[in-house]
């Protein structure tokens, strides 16, 4: 609802019950606009899912154009992960290529979006006790992963980082909260 409509709606509420038909029309109009926006967003999300596959496959220019449409449609939270993207030949661990793909888009549209990323899936490694693990939630790895994501994304801040996987020093029931220093 726009400012003018919202102001009018508040005025009508203050005028009392006799304004119910006009208030109802304002809310019906708002509902119709929201339905139209939902359809637009569904189309944009479908295109995004197609164009920005979790493991690569989209041309960067196509992905940037789709992201531009998504942001213009009102979706401003971009959520990525260091593991998203197609790994480069000869590399192990998180690919980071989706974050690299986002960097040129963010260079142009950084003020228009909020950015979140995830870390923790590192590939298969053998621990000292012989067990294998695919995640790393240690604080020192969290710092390394976040620094690497910031470099790949070409930004100096991220609003959210999420650890995917086990955080060794915390029992499962207390996995959220600040990292210990």
Image: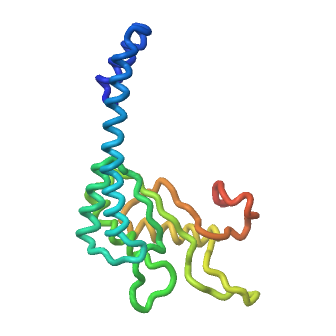
**Residue 41 placed where, x, y %?**
34, 51
Question: Farthest front residue?
Answer: 21
- Rendered image quadrant of residue 89: bottom left
Q: How many marks?
A: 0
Residue in view at x 31 percent, y 55 percent: 70
Residue in view at x 76 percent, y 87 percent: 129
Render colour scheme: rainbow
29 relative to 40, above or below: above
37 relative to 45, above or below: above
The quarter of the picture where the N terminus appears is top left
**Residue 19 placed where, x, y %?**
37, 11
**Residue 2 placed where, x, y %?**
31, 29
Residue in view at x 55 percent, y 67 percent: 143
Question: Farthest bottom residue?
Answer: 90
The quarter of the picture where the C terminus appears is bottom right
- Rendered image quadrant of residue 20: top left
93 sits to left or right of 140: left
- 144 vs 10, nearest the viewer: 10
172 sits to left or right of 48: right
- 102 vs 69, nearest the viewer: 69
Residue in view at x 37 percent, y 77 percent: 56
79 relative to 9, above or below: below
**Residue 151 placed where, x, y %?**
40, 69
């Amino acid at each position: 609802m726009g400012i003018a409509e919202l102001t009018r709606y508040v005025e009508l509420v203050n005028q009392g019950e006799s304004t119910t038909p006009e208030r109802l029309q304002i809310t019906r109009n708002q509902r119709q606009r929201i339905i139209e926006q939902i359809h637009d967003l569904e189309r944009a999300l479908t295109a995004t899912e197609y164009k920005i596959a979790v493991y690569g496959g989209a041309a960067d220019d196509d992905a940037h154009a789709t992201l531009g449409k998504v942001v213009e449609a009102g979706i401003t939270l971009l959520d990525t992960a260091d593991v998203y993207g197609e790994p480069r030949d000869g590399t192990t661990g998180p690919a980071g290529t989706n974050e690299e793909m986002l960097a040129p888009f963010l260079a142009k549209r950084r003020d228009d979006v909020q950015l979140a990323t995830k870390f923790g899936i590192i590939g298969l490694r053998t621990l000292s006790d012989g067990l294998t693990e695919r995640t790393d939630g240690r604080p020192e790895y969290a710092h390394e992963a976040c620094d690497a994501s910031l470099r790949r994304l070409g930004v100096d801040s991220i609003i959210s980082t999420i650890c995917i996987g086990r955080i060794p020093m915390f029992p499962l029931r207390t996995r959220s909260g600040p990292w210990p220093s």
